[in-house]
Image (spheres, rainbow, N blue to C red):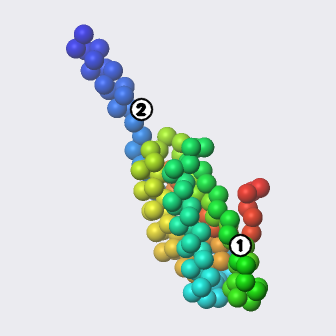
Amino acid sequence: MVVLAAVSFLVVLCIVETLDTSQVLLLCSEETSVSNNSMGRVKDVIHDVLEHTANTKAGNNYYAHQLCYRQEEQCDGFQELYGHGECTVTLSAEDCKTCLGEANRQLFDQCTERMGAQIQLMDCRLRYEKYDFTDD
């Protein structure tokens, strides 16, 4: 009986997944931002993605869309802005938030002031663009 309990415990330990934030892919747009205002809008969309992705029931997958309602020259090249975050379905909400936070840090460290960027870590991904990429 003790052996069976120990074997069951080991099987459960093998199923538990650990968070992996190793970078798999990083793509930075060649086009750079024209102002701090446009990067502020990017950070707003990414914040929306970070806040909602882990709490979304459909597989930790969330898309954000933001429109600029001002005149085009005041939108700094971002008339529309799109963001996406996704975590592997096996991650807890807390691990998903942790993974996306690390993806966010790496993305903005390595793709400074870019008009679009995406990063794929082993357990999550984060992306923003000034065009709709939902059909990609």
Q: Name the spot of residue 73 as percent of width and height, x first.
A: 74, 89
Q: Quadrant of residue 42?
A: bottom right
Q: Residue at x 56, y 72 (%)?
A: 44
Q: Considering depth in this image, is 111 or 91 the residue closer to the camera?
A: 91
Q: Residue furthest front?
A: 69
Q: Name the spot of residue 50 as percent of width and height, x first.
A: 52, 61
Q: The N terminus is located in which quarter?
A: top left
Q: Residue at x 26, y 21 (%)?
A: 6
Q: Considering depth in this image, is 27 or 69 the residue closer to the camera?
A: 69
Instruction: Determine crowd level at label 2: few under 14, some 14-19, many 20+ residues with C-alpha closer than 10 A.
Output: few
Q: Quadrant of residue 28?
A: bottom right
Q: Quadrant of residue 63?
A: bottom right
Residue 125 seen in render = no
Kind of residue indicated by mark 2: Ile
Figure check: 110 above or below 63: below
Figure check: 7 above or below 27: above
Residue 89 seen in render = yes
Kind of residue indicated by mark 1: Leu
Q: Residue furthest left?
A: 2
Q: Is residue 77 left or right of residue 120?
A: right
Q: The C terminus is located in which quarter?
A: bottom right
Give the structural element (helix, strand or loop) at label 1: strand
Q: Residue at x 34, y 32 (%)?
A: 13
Figure check: 59 above or below 13: below
Q: Which mark is residue 77?
A: none
Q: Which mark is residue 15?
A: 2
Q: Earlier in the sequence, mark 2 or mark 1?
A: 2
Q: Which mark is residue 67?
A: 1
Give the structural element (helix, strand or loop) at label 2: helix
Q: Name the spot of residue 10 as percent of width and height, x first.
A: 32, 26
Q: Residue at x 58, y 80 (%)?
A: 39
Q: Residue furthest top?
A: 1
